[in-house]
Amino acid sequence: MFGYTFQWNQALARLPKILDGAAVTMEVAVLSMLIGIALAIFLTLLRLSGSRPLGAIATTWVEVARNTPALFQIYMAHFGVASFGIHFSPFVSLLIGITFNNAGYLAENFRGALKAIPETQTRAGRSLGMSQGQAFRYIILPQMLRISFLPMTNQMVWAVLMTSLGVTVGMNTDLYGVTQDLNALTFRTFELFAIAAVIFYLITKIITLGARAIAWRLFRY
Amino acid sequence: MKTLTMAAALIATTALAGTAQADKLDDIIASGTLRCAVVLDFPPMGMRDENNNPIGFDVDYCNDLAAALGVKSEIVETPFPERIPALMSGRVDVGVASTSDTLERAKTVGFSIPYFAFEMAVTSNDASGIKSFDDMKGHTVGATAGTFEAIALEKQINEWGDGTFRPYQTQADVFLALSQGQIDATVSTSTVAQANVKTGNFPGISVVGKAPFDTDYVALFTNRDEYGLINYLNLFVNQQIRTGRYAELYEKWVGGELPALTVPNAYR
């Protein structure tokens, strides 16, 4: 096959390092999702607040996050902010970039989910003596999170895959970064990236299957 | 008559077997085009002029090689990490990509004798107070991912056990990060260091000294089992030096003292 002999033992010997990278990738993805969900709820509240400037801030965030490449967002979180003298490590830059992206997409998901919840429910809650905030917290928010649960899973998968963009800001501890480092060292390109691809696939598969299992347990009527 | 048929069949078989065994050198000559992998964000070895045409030492070197073979040259832009996929997938015939000839890599590809040698220099951000190689201990430093100096610097940081190493994807990103103070110092080839400081695009940085790494010999590379082509490449590199073309190209793109490509007290 195309003048290249696969030497799997050369690549597999580096598997522990690659798996360490996978752990960092998971760490970034999970953190970016947790913070991203919190921010997305916050953005949704800003949009619901009825205040025009606050709504505009949220809309701008969502527009930029959804309509520019994630690569640009991550690059800006590193080199862009540095022109103002703010320095983030590659890890933090990557985390900020992905979180920003997550929050934008999730806010839009939440908006769609809110549309599916009849407004009469808020009024029903109000008529039972709940405040506006209580009605949102106890009636709307749980339903919103349930409706957007599967889109959130999608975003989690995206977050995992987006970590591979960290190499553009000097990240070399995540799955893709470690693989690229090892590639430079050994030139065992095909074996190493094949291993990385399988690990990426396994991670995302576990996430989607896991999410389905959670949804099945949590959302039974 | 029977003998004649047998002889004809034998000749035909040999001829067919002959073409089937044509090696890469034959393929290049037959196709009329030599495709070289060249890294084009690595001035002065490979870059683009204002009309976006590829220029640089490696580009000229590829053109010379094509001329020697009597074929046209085609420059295939190849970032550092994609050199091997480009070769293995048959997109390029030869790498003229400032590739360090490490033993680890030679397990995968076939290298010619060295055609260029780099000396390594330390460039630091003026605010960092780094004045020499050893001053880098404990600092955040960076280099271009996939290069000889990146591998060596990361190893050194691990040996010191103090400080952080960051690989950036391009030479330009390294110097941008250095200029912004995201990293305190970098090790790069002295040619690149001088060139970048001189542009004035990256204020607040200066070349502060040499890095005590081994001389970085870089070689042409192709598939490991293409002995015919590797043999040709070796002779070509030798001829470039013999005819003074190496010195000429060095003067044109780099300037200064010509680095020796031989290792003292060694056979090859």
Image (cartoon, coloured by chain):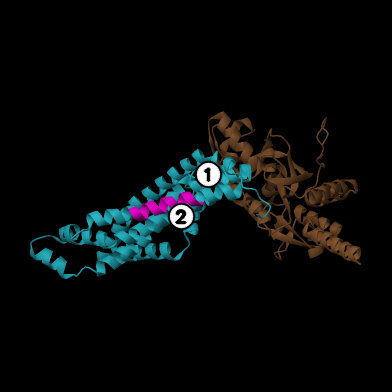
Chain colours: A cyan, B brown
Q: Residues within 10 Å of mark 2 (few under 14, many from 20)?
A: many
* Closer to us: A16 or A77: A16
Secondary-structure class at tag 2 = helix
The segment highlighted magenta reads A197-209
Q: To which chain does the residue with label 2 belong?
A: A
Q: Nearer the viewer, residue B194 or B53?
A: B53
The quarter of the rendered structure image containing the C terminus of chain A is bottom left
Residue B65 seen by the camera: yes
| Up/down of A59 relative to A204, above or below | below
- Left or right of A34, for residue A3: right
Residue B32 showing in the rendered view: no
The x, y position of residue B65, in whole percent, is 82, 55
**Residue A160, position in %: x, y?**
43, 52
* Residue A164 in the image, given as x and y percentages of width and height: 49, 52
Left or right of residue B87: residue B68: right
- Height in image: B185 above or below B53? above
**Which one is in front, B155 or A202?**
A202
* Amino acid type of the residue that numbered disc 2 sits on in the rendered structure: Met
**First in sequence: mark 1 vs mark 2:** 2
Q: Nearer the viewer, residue B128 or A192?
A: A192
Q: Quick one: which residue is furthest to the front in this view? A: B2
Quick check: A90 above or below A133? Answer: above
Residue A97 x %, y %: 44, 54
Q: Please tell me how crowded label 1 is: few (under 14), some (14-19), or many (20+) other residues with Cα within 10 Å.
A: many
List the residue tagged with mark 2: A162
Q: Are marks 1 and 2 on the same chain?
A: yes
Residue found at x 81% / y 40%: B261
Q: Amino acid at mark 1?
A: Val
Residue placed under numbered mark 1 in the picture: A178
Q: Residue at x 77, y 59 (%)?
A: B20
Marks 1 and 2, how far apart at CA: 15 Å
Contact? badges 1 and 2 (CB < 8 Å) = no
